[in-house]
Amino acid sequence: MNLPLSYFERLPKTDLHVHLDGSLRLSTILELAEEGGIQLPAMDADGLRKAMHLGENTGSLVEYLKAFDITLQVLQTEASLYRAAYELAEDAAKENVRYMEVRYAPMLHTRQGLRLTTVVEAVLSGLRAAQKDFGILSNVIVCGIRNISPQSSLEMAQLCVAYKNRGVIAFDLAGAEYDHPAKHHLESFQLVRDNNICVTIHAGEAYGPESIHQAIHVCGAHRIGHGCRLREDGDLLHYVNDHRITLECCPSSNVQTGAVRDLASHPLKLYYDLGLRVTVNTDNRLITDTTVSKELWLAHTQMRLGPEEIKHIVLNGFKAGFLPFHVRQQLLREVSVELEAIQAGDEKEGATKPKPRTKKAAASEKASADA
């Protein structure tokens, strides 16, 4: 018997792969367009939803990314960036996301002359305000774009270095994957790695396992965004598993971009069964029309992952976050207690009165955190 969506909404969760410019509220896009005198393909919710193909299978990553042409039009001011970040964190907090890593490319928000530093600080301010109001911890991942010049990616890497320890915690390479290899942006990755900054790279979504190999062995990725096609190279798969390189899985998005045929054939369960550290994420809350809770529910109902497996995947999210080790360890302890309480049907006690831990349980939790 399948568990209801409400069960997954109660679980404490992470969202490690979510794009700011793909996760606005539809109502916010319309309001910002009206305020800025911006003409969109449609100026009503239903019409805009159809124009952006929200939640639809687009057949390719390139087609899927066209929706960003609309969202980026309304994200060119300091106020709109602050609002988008704040509302994203608020929406995530409402479904009990405890930790979130928001990624975006600041260079895409300078059409009206905003300085890159202003773009970064507006988003950080919105996330900090949401943390104060809703208790959700969020950090930023700065993205370079594959299909834009390597020099632009280097500027993003420099921005990443400048805001290290100020809310920016990693560097990513996003955008059209096919025919745009990550190695062309090697200078950017070298810069962030020289400054001890974490790296995650979109790979194995619209191109084969060679893209994942390059992301790890040439560019030094600590995590892989998507990784759907890793299953095509068993040797590389075992390397990823042995070295605990996390996969940021985004099931519904992968179906919509044509990376996988349908949810039932998604490799998430295969990866989990083989022992890989997999996480479940939204990718784009608006464009994919999803939440973390919905993605976990779909993993349960469409991929036949049971409650215990879902629990492990949730914990993987806290293990894989780009946070200081001791912060991750503390989060894992708190979340483990809550998950046990929810599974036992005692959600109230888990949220307000953590169970005392034995020495054996504490040792087990530490080993789990280290894994």
Image: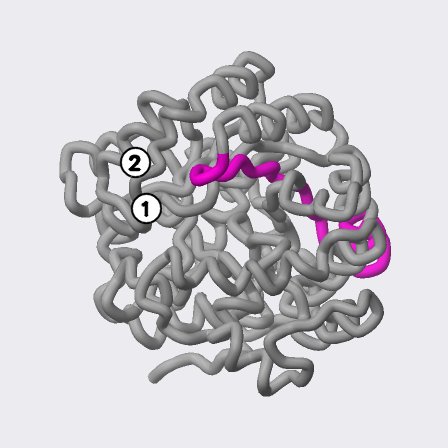
**Tag 1 and tag 2, C-beta contact below 8 Å:** yes
Q: Residues within 10 Å of mark 1 (few under 14, many from 20)?
A: many
Q: Is residue 223 visible?
A: yes
Q: Nearer the viewer, residue 60 or 244?
A: 60
Looking at marks 1 and 2 on the same chain, the residue that comes earlier in the sequence is marked by 2
Q: Which mark is residue 227?
A: 1
Q: Position of residue 13 (x, y in %)?
A: 57, 58
Residue 140 relative to residue 66: left or right = right
What amino acid is labelled 2 in the image? Ile
Above or below — where is 51 with respect to 14? below
**In the image, which residues are magenta?**
126-148
The quarter of the picture where the N terminus appears is: bottom left
Q: Secondary structure at mark 2?
A: helix
Query: Residue shown at 35%/60% (left/top)?
Result: 254
Q: Which mark is residue 212?
A: 2
- Give the CA distance from mark 1 to mark 2: 7 Å
